[in-house]
Every structure is written in C-alpha cells, then in structure tokens.
Amino acid sequence: LINTATNPLGQDWTDEKNLDDFMPSKIVLPVDQKVRVRITAKDVLHNFYLPHFRVKMDAVPGLPTYFIFTPIKTTQEYREELRKYPEWQVPADPTDPDSKQRWEEFNYELACAELCGKGHYSMKRIVEIVDRGTYEDWLKSQNSFYLGNIRNTDADPYKGDLLKIEIDERKVELKSEFMSALESDDAEVIRLKHVFFETGKSNLQEISEYELDNVAALIGENENVKVELSGHTDSTGDDDLNMALSEARAKAVRNYLLEKGVSSASIIAKGYGETAPIDSNETPEGRQNNRRTELKILAK
C-alpha cells in the first residue's frame, strides 16, 4: 500500500477511519489531556523520543506499539520558566544581537533517538502544547490527506460517492454561508454544491437530500426568510430547452423543500437557463461550474 508520492503511510482507504487523518508539519497537543501515541516503522528500527516529557519508545517495523502521556505545561508556560535563567536570556542567533532571546524561541521537540540511516538527523518535529481552545481551532484548520490527495482519483475506492465526512463538513459550511448571507446587506448567492440531477432531466439524485435537508432546516429556523432557488445550465444545446430544464430543476428543488415542511410563501423558483454563466463554456470544467443550483435570500 505504501507509495511515497500518494500514500506515504500505506493507509487503507477502504477503511473509513483513515479518511479524516492529516499529516501536520508540527504536532499540536492540548495541555492536561491524556495523549495516546501509536507508533510503528516502515523500514528500519527507529525511536520515538520526546526528551522534555521523558518519553522514549522504539518504533519497530511491523510491530505497532503505543504509550500514553499527559503534557502538564504549555509551550508558553515552559518558555516563561526558562526566561528566569541567564543562559536563556541571550540572543537565539549568536550572530544577531537583535534576534529573539533563546527562551522565546524554545519549542518542545520530537526526534528519532536511533541511528537509523542517512535521514536520521532530519527526523524531527516541533511539538506545541496549547490550551484546549487553541487546540480545537488548530484541529479544525487541518485538512484531510485523503480529501486533498486521494479523493476522486483512480486510487479512491469511493470515487463518485458522497462520504459522511463530506456531508458533515458541508453541513457546517452551508450554515456558515447561510448565516453570512442573513447578516449581509447585499443579496448574497449560495451555491448548493451537493444538489445533483439526472443527466438532461429534472429528477433529483438521491445524494441531493443531504444538502436539501440542511437547507430546509436553515429556512425553518428563520421564519421570516424568503429565498429564491435558481437553476442554471451551460450553453450546450437549444436555448429554449435549457431555459425549460433550468426552470424544471429549480421547481424540483422547491417541491422537495415543500415536502420537508418549508412554507410555500418562503420559496420561489426561477430558471435562468444559460443566461448567467459563472465560468467559460469552452471547457468541460467551466460547463460543469455553470450547471448549478443557487439560493439567494430575498427577505429576512
């Protein structure tokens, strides 16, 4: 499974537990929380070493091991302790007297404590210990390796499917877009990214229900909202047929929302055909972008 370019850790993408994994440039951990570290090696014997935490364990090829430890001081707290000592009150860069002092530049460090080969001295990571809130913010900012590198490629076993991780992320994103549009003085347009139809028809594909159920909930939570649902096509084919198709698709979305309990007074449906492109119709990607369903808040 290991591929240095596309799958450096040899992860099994058919196991959904791997899909939200990420590979950060530094390790961020919350203070006063137990941390379970599971380690193994891909090639030779290594050693997982956190000197400031007095933690050290071999990483053995083919033999997963683990340990548990609890960081009790944030990086900043430890820096403040080091600040008391004269040897840390000197420039971090000896050639630059104006550089930050050593205590300001201190970081916890993860290293390999085994002479494992020519790459040994580059096997280091900064470990930053932070409060719980900062950790949660950092965690939210990380991007799944699978979604960024594997999704919809030939290596993706779920190509063409909509995954739970995407559904959950889109729910949060859609709510943020909707609330932003409510607060804006302008008539902001929200693209309904996960609304799909059968080719050349107005029949909604089943996977569209996740997006539309979220839309129904958001409109239901804001009783005074009135929205326009708009259908759009690319420029392929007859203009009149494209207009009719876009209108039928907008109405299909409206009907779905009505079935979910949204008031008919809250929604109007309108088709724009190919008259409002957002991209070029000269490329497949551009035409795909132009085929879309949008939501615009008309009244709040």
Image (cartoon, rainbow, N blue to C red):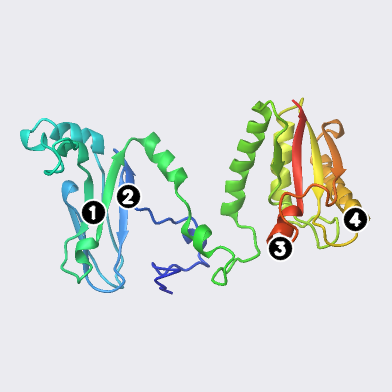
* Type of amino acid at the residue the image marks with label 1: Leu
Q: Quadrant of the N terminus?
A: bottom left
Going from N to C along the chain, the mark reached first, 2 or 4, is 2
The percent position of residue 5, horizontal first and vertical second, equals 42, 70
According to the image, label 2 marks what residue?
27
According to the image, label 3 marks what residue?
283
Q: Is residue 142 left or right of residue 277?
A: left
Residue 240 is at least partly visible in this image:
yes
**Depicted 43 relative to depicted 51: above or below:** below
Going from N to C along the chain, the mark reached first, 3 or 1, is 1
Which circle marks residue 274 in the picture?
A: none
Q: Residue at x 92, y 57 (%)?
A: 241
Going from N to C along the chain, the mark reached first, 1 or 2, is 2
* Type of amino acid at the residue the image marks with label 2: Ile
Residue 261 is at least partly visible in this image:
no
* Type of amino acid at the residue the image marks with label 4: Asp
Going from N to C along the chain, the mark reached first, 4 or 1, is 1
Which circle marks residue 239 in the picture?
A: 4
Q: Is residue 103 left or right of residue 166?
A: left
Mark 4 and mark 3: Cα distance apart in space: 18 Å
Quadrant in the rendering for residue 172: top right
- Dot 3: what SS? loop
Which circle marks residue 110 in the picture?
A: 1
**10 Å neighbourhood of mark 3: few (<14), some, or many (≥20)?**
few
- Disc 3 vs disc 1: which is toward the camera? 3
The percent position of residue 124, horizontal first and vertical second, equals 24, 57
- Dot 1: what SS? strand
